[in-house]
Amino acid sequence: MDTEVATLNIEDYEECLTLMDSVFTVQNGWKMQMRKELPKVFATPERYAKAFHWGIRDNGRLCAVVGFYPMDLIVNGLKIRCCTVGNVVTRADQRAKGYMRQCFTRAMQELPRQDIVLARLGGLRQRYNSCGYERAGTACRYSLTKYNVLKCVDAAAFLKYSFRELNEFDDETLNDMLKLHNSRRCYVERYNAEGLWHVLHHHFMQPCAIVDEQGRLQGYLTASEKGGVVSELVTRDEAERLNALAAWITYRRLDEADVLIMPWELISHYMLGRVCEHFSEDSPSMFCVLQWDLLIDALIKFKHSYSALPDGEIVLCIEGCGNLIIGVKGDNAGCQKSDRASDISMSRMEAARFLFGPLAASAVRPIPHRLQALCNAYFPLPLTWFPQDSV
């Protein structure tokens, strides 16, 4: 039957991109070019073929598409298999026929086949709640102004940095940048210099190398064309991140620049929190957890490594997923499945917000008095997502 969901292949590349460009242009209000928006996936037919796409044709014409993009999240050395289910589009004259739901259902069926622990996407909350996704996690954004720099940052400390634009053939610098990326305590795997180059250009961002007075690489950033949105900033020494951002504001003659800082980057929080003009905290994505025990185990171990947690145990029942013991004893922290009676029971949607934030656990739901201190210490766990790895 023509309107069944079918796997798209490399021969469908141009038609798939044409459909996505046209739908997203109308939806966003500006001309979309997926080749430039997400070059890691769409720059060439060969890159497109490495991902999964499903579509529906009506009378031979492609009218609905969904993409499935596996990737590895590295959490303190542990690999967590993740994916984005996204770029969901339906031709305007073919809506209200259930095509989007059919394509999305097919993509969701792929999650257990690929042993996915965590899936993510962006979109309307209630639309994707029904598919098991909930807005959760934590992303912290700091805004630094030129006045903050003038009054609070030592010019001698940041004027030692300059910025060098890159090209895709600058393999030596890109490989050094990849090493810096891979030295982070939590990151999405980008595999090689070419992968890094493409990811740093996602969403029309423009990467630069950060070099010192001797021309040595000290970090990198990727920012919007006008420079005011710094989507990713990595420095060899985390304590130099404020100086690097101050140097960027001065170099680009900006009034203000925003930068995203991850929950575990404590030195950055200490330094930017002392001088920034504005701070905000929000959820970076909508998440669907498939293997709760593996994800919680990795994240509570990670949190315990940078923020000593008190000894204790909580038995949490998540609807449809069974009971989990989450606990800390001395230097050890972890999560495992259990047959013990639960202390707290909740739905999957509530569990996502309770465990991963951005609010404190006690702001998500009532907690038994004897467990309040423990829950507010353990949660939220440091789940986040990185803008450049959003596809």
Image: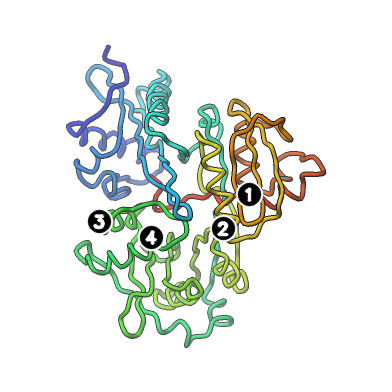
Q: Secondary structure at mark 2?
A: loop
The residue that mark 1 highlights is: 380
- Please report whichever mark, 2 or 1, sits nearer to the chain's N-terminal start: 2
| Residue 67 in picture, x, y percent from top left | 34, 34
The residue that mark 2 highlights is: 263
| Residue 234 in picture, x, y percent from top left | 42, 66
Q: Are marks 2 and 1 in contact (CB under 8 Å)?
A: yes
Q: For the view shown, which residue lies furthest in the right direction?
A: 369
Structural distance between the alpha carbons of marks 4 and 1: 24 Å
Q: Amino acid at mark 1?
A: Pro
- Please report whichever mark, 3 or 1, sits nearer to the chain's N-terminal start: 3
The relative height of residue 179 versus residue 86 in the rendered view (above or below) is below
**10 Å crowding of disc 2: few (<14), some (14-19), many (20+):** some
Q: Secondary structure at mark 1?
A: loop
| Residue 170 in picture, x, y percent from top left | 22, 67
Q: Amino acid at mark 2?
A: Pro
